[in-house]
Image (tube, grey):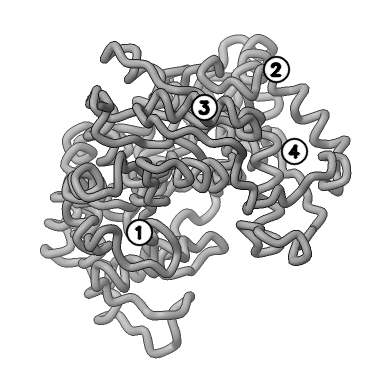
């Protein structure tokens, strides 16, 4: 009899999790139900339920689907879970010793490049090599660092949770997936008596060529990886540094000793431009822990600062930019889910058509604020994006590496930046550019109902930073 009631495969996109699932399902007595807690579908794309539990029922009660998988699977049931899936699952599964944890890892460079190729070709799974699509892609160092940081943070979170609860996981590297003995060992770990004579290889490797043939800028990738200074990349539990400080997003002046810790949803572009204007050349970006330390050492007396925006205005900016689509970064899957699953009255297309008026905007934004309250409190399957996470949580994350010396309110931004510049020897600071292109639209729809909904969603920020009403 198995010592487990169910299992979770902790993996990421392009780590071989489809291949692993196919072979787990080849054992009699094991049943893996796909990405059961993907916020945008249930189990597999175009499927509407798992064992009779619908996506809406899952979103309302994550525990109900876990219980169904435990009790109604054909044998020991489980599912695959990625770092951006429904975080409520972690609160249920990680502390539970009756949940078997399988952690699948792959060299992050390989998985990142594979992910970019899949995005370019639209081919996420291959069962017939005759249908293989190929594409040469460009390696974006900053995008990779952001991707790597998210993977590191999640793997360290898993590791620490297991350490603190006295549990261990079954670790599988991508390279181990082709070893039938390892697969049989995993089955033994799960308490399954069945064994495989050979692996099911119906899922084919999509991009077997070396990295140098997959990338248009292989040399640039090599230079970027040298900067990272961490080469034990395939064994993610040992990844360093242990941080959630969003270091790749830091922005520093090239010569003036000021470094900006940006909070998404705030005046990031305006402050970045101000730092560039301060020295008359582009601000520095794309930091790592190592390069931040080098910058700080080169510029003694440096100051770190961040800027907090009124929570209501920040939520409105995020809504306009990422949900309505007034910026280049539209969260397409999230906006689709908000329309279909939560009934938020946003237009089908982004940006909104010409007949999208203030009354419609007010109704949609008010519904979004009410959804934010649930999302921030961990009551939805959708990630709490950095663009609308509480600013208090973001600033706490900064403190894992370097806490900001100064926290500036956006309302006082120009005066405070001038004072900050003067404190490091710059008497004639530049003016700051226009900050929020959506503020006039917010002014037209603002009322007590919107203020109340914002306070309900962002009680922590109102209290932590002492914000009052957006307008008196």
Q: Residues within 10 Å of mark 2 (few under 14, many from 20)?
A: few
Vertical position of residue 297 compared to residue 114: above or below:
above
Q: Where does residue 43 sit, x and y in percent of width and height?
A: 38, 56
Q: Where does residue 383 sit, x and y in percent of width and height?
A: 36, 48
For the residues bearing labels 3 and 1, Cβ distance under 8 angstroms: no
Tell me how far mark 3 sits from mark 4, CA to CA. Answer: 33 Å
Q: Residue at (60%, 40%) from the top-left corner?
A: 199
Q: Residues within 10 Å of mark 4 (few under 14, many from 20)?
A: few
Tell me how far mark 2 sits from mark 1, CA to CA. Answer: 38 Å
In the image shown, does 222 or 284 lie closer to the viewer? Answer: 222
Which residue position is annotated with label 2?
Answer: 229
Lower sequence index among marks 3 and 1: 1
In the image shown, does 440 or 5 lie closer to the viewer? Answer: 5
Mark 4 secondary-structure assignment? loop
Lower sequence index among marks 3 and 4: 3
Tell me how far mark 4 sits from mark 2, CA to CA. Answer: 27 Å
Q: Residue at (31%, 32%) from the top-left corner?
A: 393
Tell me how far mark 1 sits from mark 4, CA to CA. Answer: 48 Å
Lower sequence index among marks 2 and 3: 3
Lower sequence index among marks 1 and 4: 1
Which quarter of the rendered picture does the N terminus lie within?
top left
Which residue position is annotated with label 4?
Answer: 281
* Image side of residue 154 versus residue 59, left or right: right
Q: Where does residue 240 sit, x and y in percent of width and height?
A: 55, 16
Which residue position is annotated with label 3?
Answer: 152
Mark 1 secondary-structure assignment? loop
Mark 3 secondary-structure assignment? helix
Quarter assignment of residue 109: top right
């Amino acid at each position: 009899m198995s010592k487990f009631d169910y299992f979770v495969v902790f993996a990421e996109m392009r780590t071989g999790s489809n291949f692993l699932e196919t072979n787990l399902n080849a054992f009699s007595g094991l049943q893996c139900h796909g990405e059961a807690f993907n916020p945008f579908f249930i189990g597999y794309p175009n499927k509407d339920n798992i064992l009779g539990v619908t996506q809406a029922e899952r979103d309302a009660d994550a525990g109900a689907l876990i219980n169904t998988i435990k009790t109604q699977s054909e044998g020991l049931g489980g599912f695959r879970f990625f770092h951006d899936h429904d975080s409520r699952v972690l609160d249920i599964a990680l502390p539970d010793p009756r949940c078997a944890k399988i952690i699948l890892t792959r060299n992050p460079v390989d998985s990142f490049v594979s992910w970019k190729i899949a995005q370019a070709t639209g081919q996420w799974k291959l069962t017939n090599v005759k249908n293989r699509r190929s594409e040469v892609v460009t390696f974006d160092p900053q995008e990779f660092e952001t991707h790597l940081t998210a993977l590191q943070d999640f793997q360290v979170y898993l590791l620490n949770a297991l350490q603190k609860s006295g549990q261990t996981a079954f670790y599988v590297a991508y390279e181990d997936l082709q070893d039938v003995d390892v697969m049989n060992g995993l089955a033994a770990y799960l308490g399954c008596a069945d064994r495989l004579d050979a692996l099911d290889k119906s899922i084919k490797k999509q991009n077997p060529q070396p990295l140098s043939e997959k990338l248009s800028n292989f040399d640039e990738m090599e230079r970027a990886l040298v900067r990272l200074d961490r080469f034990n990349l395939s064994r993610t539990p040992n990844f360093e540094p242990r941080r959630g400080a969003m270091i790749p997003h830091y922005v520093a002046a090239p010569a003036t000793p000021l470094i900006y810790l940006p909070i998404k949803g705030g005046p990031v572009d305006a402050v970045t431009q101000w730092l560039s204007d301060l020295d008359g050349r582009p601000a520095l970006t794309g930091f790592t822990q190592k390069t931040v330390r080098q910058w700080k050492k080169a510029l003694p007396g440096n100051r770190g600062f961040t800027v907090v925006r009124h929570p209501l205005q920040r939520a409105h900016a995020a809504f306009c930019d990422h949900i309505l689509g007034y910026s280049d970064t539209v969260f397409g899957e999230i906006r689709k889910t908000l329309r279909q699953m939560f009934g938020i009255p946003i237009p089908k297309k982004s940006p909104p058509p010409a007949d999208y008026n203030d009354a419609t905007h007010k109704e949609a934004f008010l519904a979004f604020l009410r959804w934010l309250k649930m999302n921030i409190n961990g009551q939805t399957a959708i990630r709490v994006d950095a663009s609308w996470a509480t600013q208090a949580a973001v600033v706490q994350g900064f403190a894992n590496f370097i806490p900001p010396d100064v926290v500036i309110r956006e309302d006082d931004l120009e005066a405070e930046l001038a004072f900050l510049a003067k404190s490091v020897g710059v008497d004639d600071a530049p003016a700051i550019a226009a900050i929020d292109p959506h503020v006039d639209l917010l002014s037209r729809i603002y009322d007590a109902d919107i203020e109340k909904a914002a306070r309900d969603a962002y009680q922590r920020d109102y209290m932590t930073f002492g914000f009052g009403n957006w307008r008196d």
